[in-house]
Image (cartoon, grey):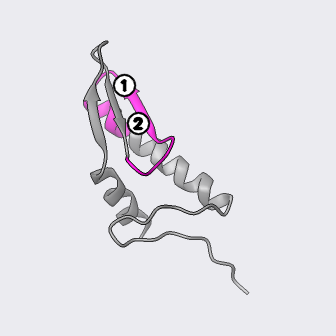
Amino acid sequence: MLTKYIQAAMKRAKYEILDDETFYGSIPGFQGVWSDMDTLEECREELQEVLEDWILFRLSKGLALPEVDGIQLAVREIV
């Protein structure tokens, strides 16, 4: 499920070329998840790494994650 969530989120990514000819990428709805690299491929790879770290951080703190294409990730307490 985690892989599908990441893949679905990455499909929402938006990229642009900045004035200094680097590539900027971000994912709408994922505040603070962005990348700025020399090539589009490097930008995409870095963006996915940032997304993965962001997901793990939010889950570790018990913070909500946005639903993506009907996929919801949440930490559930086991009793």
Instruction: Locate the C terminus by quadrant.
Output: bottom right
Whole-percent x and y of residue 48? Answer: 40, 45
Q: State how far apart marks 2 and 1 are (Cα).
A: 8 Å
Residue lying at the far right in this picture: please name it: 79
* Residue at figure coordinates x 32%, y 67% from the top left: 69
Q: Secondary structure at mark 1?
A: strand
* Residue at figure coordinates x 60%, y 56% from the top left: 58
Tell me the residue that label 2 is attached to.
Answer: 46
Tell me the residue that label 1 is attached to.
Answer: 37
Whole-percent x and y of residue 4? Answer: 35, 65
Image quadrant assignment for residue 42: top left
As drawn, 20 above or below 35: above
Q: Earlier in the sequence, mark 2 or mark 1?
A: 1
Instruction: Locate the N terminus by quadrant.
Output: bottom left
Q: Is residue 55 left or right of residue 10?
A: right
> Does residue 44 show up magenta in the picture?
yes
Residue lying at the far bottom in this picture: please name it: 79
Stretch of the chain drawn in magenta: 28-45
As drawn, 49 above or below 20: below
* Residue at figure coordinates x 40%, y 40% from the top left: 47
Q: Are marks 2 and 1 in contact (CB under 8 Å)?
A: yes
Q: Amino acid at mark 1?
A: Met
Whole-percent x and y of residue 22? Answer: 31, 20
